[in-house]
Image: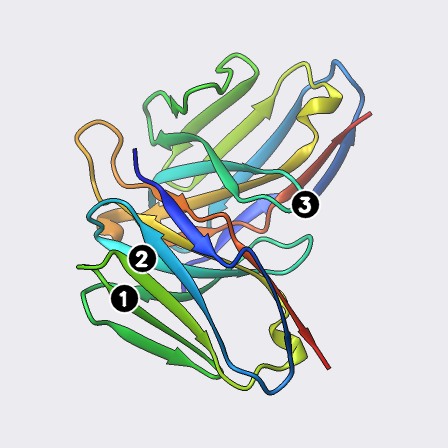
Amino acid sequence: GAVVSQHPSRVICKSGTSVKIECRSLDFQATTMFWYRQFPKKSLMLMATSNEGSKATYEQGVEKDKFLINHASLTLSTLTVTSAHPEDSSFYICSAEGRGRIYGYTFGSGTRLTVV
Amino acid sequence: ELKVEQNPLFLSMQEGKNYTIYCNYSTTSDRLYWYRQDPGKSLESLFVLLSNGAVKQEGRLMASLDTKARLSTLHITAAVHDLSATYFCAVDVGPRETSGSRLTFGEGTQLTVNP
């Protein structure tokens, strides 16, 4: 089946630094990747959608300059949290959709970001 | 704007009992998904429902879809402790001209099965 690998699973960083999270589709080409943020005991909130080779589409209220998304290839998307602050601490989950929607949506294992 | 509502949001039940989680959505949908999430973990796919009247079963869980009523249900039969988790439904609105396909999630139902 379709597998999406997300790294790192946990990261602790200092305020003001940047953190990069990778999302890779291992056995299929992901035409579209999605980045979600989840607060404790809440649902998933879509942050942005990225398509290979094009700019990401951000949801309303999501700061483009803070959450940089790059979808450089059909198997890799990255989310960089720039100048992180404690309020950016959250659980970030990526998801990938295969070409022709064959596989539906496959989710990565998530990244727990803690900014201290 | 698509709205997806789940109820109940919290469910505490005893082992051996049956219960149903409901998922209502506000617009025509192409697909509906059910996911399970354990604490600190990502989402595990349970079911994909593709058409009106679709019914899928896996173990003690059964999901159904009524596209006319814009309603999906997740039925739990003879619950066991291992089913304790948060369950999300998500609606796929299909490809759109500008944004493509995307999922909109319900709020989640936190299920606790007590011995």
Q: Is residue A28 left or right of residue A17?
A: left
Q: Chain of mark 3?
A: A
Q: Is residue A14 left or right of residue A95?
A: right
Residue B24 higher or lower than B13, as above or below: above
- Whether the residues at callouts 2 and 1 have beta carbons within 8 Å, the answer is yes
Give amino acid for label 3.
Ser
Q: Quadrant of the N terminus of chain B?
A: top left
The residue where tag 1 is placed is B65
Residue B11 higher or lower than B56, as above or below: above
Near mark 1 (Cα within 10 A), the count class, few <14, some 14-19 or many ≥20, is: many
- Viewer-nearest residue: B51 or B113: B113
Relative image position of residue A44 (x, y in whole percent): 51, 42
- Using the image, tell me which numbered label, if any, was put on residue B32: 2
Q: CA–CA distance between discs 3 and 2?
A: 28 Å
| Circle nearer the viewer, 3 or 1 | 1
Give amino acid for label 2.
Leu
Relative image position of residue B47 (x, y in whole percent): 38, 67
Relative image position of residue B4 (x, y in whole percent): 37, 47
Question: What residue is rendered at 67% in x and 25% in y?
Answer: A88
Question: What residue is rendered at 38% in x and 43% in y?
Answer: B104
Question: What residue is rendered at 62% in x and 28% in y?
Answer: A20
- Viewer-nearest residue: B14 or A76: B14
Q: Secondary structure at mark 2?
A: strand
Q: Chain of mark 2?
A: B
Q: Quadrant of the C terminus of chain B?
A: bottom right
Q: CA–CA distance between discs 2 and 1?
A: 8 Å
Q: Secondary structure at mark 3?
A: loop
